[in-house]
Amino acid sequence: MLNARTAADPHAWLRRQARWSPWEVVFWLATIIPFYFFPTYLTLASQVAVTALFAISVDLVLGYAGIITLGHAMFFGLGAYFAGLLTKTGWGEPLSGLVLAGLFAALIGFLVSFIIVRVQHLALLMITLGLGLLTAELANSLGWLTGGTDGLQGVDVWPIFSRFEFDLWGYTAYAYALIVLFIGVVASQRIVHSSFGLSLRGVRENLTRMPAIGSPYRRHLQIAYTISAGLAGIAGAVLTQTTETVSLDSLSFQRSADVVVMLILGGTGRLYGAILGAAIFMIARDQLSGMNPQYWYFWIGVLLMVVVLVVPNGILGGLSRLVRGRGT
Amino acid sequence: MSEPVLKTESLHKSFGSLEVTRSVSIELPRGARHALIGPNGAGKTTLINLITGQLTPDSGRILLDGADITATPVAARVHRGLTRTFQINTLFPDLTPIEAVTMAVCEREGKASQFWRPLTAHAEAIGEAFEILTRLRLGDDAMRTTRHLPYGKQRLLEMALALATKPKVLLLDEPAAGVPKDESAMLFSVIAALPEDMTILFIEHDMSIVFTFATRIVVLVSGGVLLEDEPDVVRSDPRVREVYLGQAHG
């Protein structure tokens, strides 16, 4: 296989790296299954889609740019509250709400990015953790605005295109979440396969070398962090619009930590790993908490250890290794 | 001789009480092939770190084309044409050479912030990267993951990354470090084939290579310049002999 490539053309090779694989087509076809075969699980399915989009936003910074974060729920929650509060002002149109929520989260992300790119390792972990906790406490103390521990009630979202109402069974909700996820994945892939995406991988692979090849890598990281915050905000907004409520849980540390667990389960730096991790995590939580509501995290812990020890690149990393039959 | 491209004026650097660079003033004219030699711990890599900006001098100035760059950040110096390689491979293990060098070309051209344009649309950058790799005999390995390349080829990639920045001044920190003798001759033949107007300063321990490729030699001892002259003069200088023979016996 290696020999066959010796005379290969670099342009063609790079194009191949960005091409859709048949697996991706199969995957997206499979996302339609819940509509027909598991209609009782549509609510869970849309939660999986929302969480997957959130996980992808984290993958962009953690998996591609190598920025460790334990506070990304901050942007998810900001998007969720923004979308909820927007409907309370009397504007319930979902698509513009989604875009505005994303822009708001991106703006906050941009402001925060000035601190983020100045620190590394443990300090970075603490800063992201601290900012996440601060935001959650802020939302908690601003009860008049956010509803505090009761959550934000009375969110009224208009039908999509004034036509598709969010129904009780969750058909519209799942379709909506799925389409937003799809657009999110396509946009993320575009970013990942740009020259910018390549430079992000460069930062992750070797931070010391980047300035030595003339890279303003801090600016790259700021852009990546801003985009990621916006995407997380959009995910949060979808959750608000499909559930018509916002709780403090959307800003919680638990959410920030869970999403990192999902990425490690599915595999970082490959987008679909984020989706797979989110699906496994959410479905496992649903099934296991049905058996024993208190101890379900025990099994996630077991799974996490098995994955880290057996397939360090995550489940998708392990699978792609199996399929290709060699380590790349 | 014409105006020097790179010039240092009495550079000083101390780590605590240890003076690692003492009043170093050197000049590199355009197209220079200077060697920087000296025993271990003489401060050769520190000097390169100071010139390229990884370290900040305590005092003294660095001039590139007559402009003071003493306070200029590393990346900005690279954009002005001052690039280095590293003694210990400083590569991107999970990228392929074509990806890494294309990235360096895009960074040079200021195209690396374009997050909406596919990488493959930068066809010229990819072409240039492949041309550099081919010139450095890495064409056949351009699409292999860097971590799987043999060590000698990784040394070549180290140089390819630097060349992608289109340097006016290239500082090579032991380009052949850890490479077997026959391969290091190959590495230096690549260096010898670089454009004549590129100004090069290289650190190298193998004296036969130094005397073959250098037109001038700077001898650094205990952080200070002991001597700077043509190879024949340096070779016969008793102080240099003492430093090196003393090293050999110590």
Image (cartoon, helix red, strand yellow):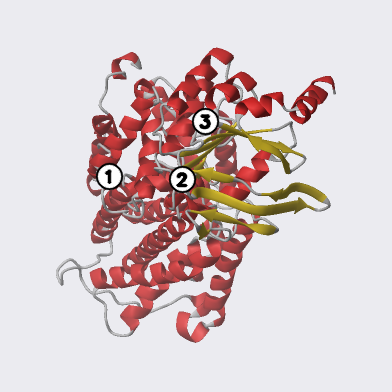
Query: In this orientation, which residue lies closer to the viewer: A85 or B184?
Result: B184
Q: Residue at x 38, y 75 (%)?
A: A82
Q: Chain of mark 2?
A: A
Marks 1 and 3 on same chain: yes
The disc, 1 or 3, on the residue closer to the chain's N-terminal end is 1
Question: How far apart, in angstroms, are the residues tagged by discs 1 and 2?
Answer: 43 Å
Query: Horizontal and vertical percent for residue A153?
Result: 40, 78
The disc, 1 or 2, on the residue closer to the chain's N-terminal end is 1
Query: Horizontal and vertical percent for residue B117?
Result: 26, 50
Residue under pointer 2? A213
Query: In this orientation, which residue lies closer to the viewer: A43 or A221?
Result: A221
Q: Residues within 10 Å of mark 2 (few under 14, many from 20)?
A: many
Residue A280 visible in the shown view = no
Q: Secondary structure at mark 2?
A: loop
Residue under pointer 3? A311
Query: Horizontal and vertical percent for residue A206?
Result: 52, 42
Query: Horizontal and vertical percent for residue A120?
Result: 60, 54
Q: Are marks 1 and 3 in contact (CB under 8 Å)?
A: no
Residue under pointer 1? A31
Quick check: B63 above or below B37?
A: below
